[in-house]
Amino acid sequence: MAIATFAAGCFWGVEAAFQQVPGVLATRVGYTGGSMPDPTYQDVCSDKTGHAEAVQLEYDPDQVSYRQLLEVFFQFHNPTELNRQGPDEGTQYRSVIFYESEAEREQAIRMIERIDASGKYSSPVVTAVVPSAEFWPAEEYHQSYYLKIGRRYSGL
């Protein structure tokens, strides 16, 4: 099994999208990329911790490749919006790929270059590609939130 971590706005929708991908075995939402240890949701919402709302995936690379996960990631959010997604605004909602290896970093950068060259967006992709950092799981009520409220993600 392998781990991948992505941030793309509110983690509820990001998690719900990845939960539909065959080969993604488990998800958990949380906070990463900042400086505050063991932050709470309220801490992260203050926009002072440096953390992003993120989703960490456990996946089977024999069923889904990292490249396929990147493709899904870029399908369900606007990677040209800096520090926001839709109505959610602040650095905690930034678009980030937290890579685990040099090969993942290279794949992410190549995909961003392809998206920029495609002309799909009128602005360049602002998704950050950074090394993975300590991941702090969010409070239990945030985990699998869409499933808990009986809602299914319909963005893919």
Image (spheres, rainbow, N blue to C red):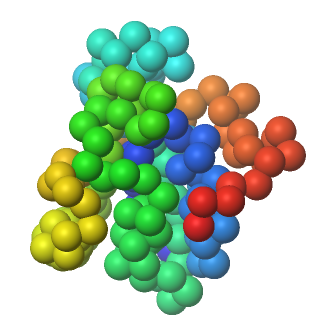
Q: Nearer the viewer, residue 58 or 45?
A: 45
| Residue 33, x across and y down, in percent | 29, 35
Does the rendering let one see residue 69? Answer: yes
- Seen in the image, is 49 located left or right of residue 56? left
| Residue 92, placed above or below residue 123 | above
Q: Nearer the viewer, residue 48 or 60?
A: 48
Image quadrant in which you'd find residue 122:
bottom left
Residue at image coords 72%, 29%: 141
Query: Which residue corresponds to the image point at 50% horizontal and 82% vertical from the top-left?
Result: 64
The image position of residue 16, as x and y in percent, is 64, 53
Residue at x-position 40% and y-position 73%: 71
User: Where residue 43 appears, x then y in whole percent?
Assistant: 44, 12
Q: Residue furthest bottom?
A: 62
Q: Residue furthest front?
A: 122
The quadrant of the picture occupied by the C terminus is: bottom right
Residue 66 position (above or below residue 75):
below
Question: Which of the 4 quarters of the picture holds residue 35?
Answer: top left
> In this image, 64 relative to 21: left or right?
left
Q: Where 139 sits versus 135, above or below? A: above
Residue at x 35%, y 78% (from the top left corner): 67
Q: Is residue 102 above or below residue 37?
A: below
Q: Nearer the viewer, residue 8 or 155?
A: 155
Q: Nearer the viewer, residue 132 or 151?
A: 151
Res. 106 visible in picture: no
Q: How many marks?
A: 0
Residue 106, image x and y in percent?
15, 72
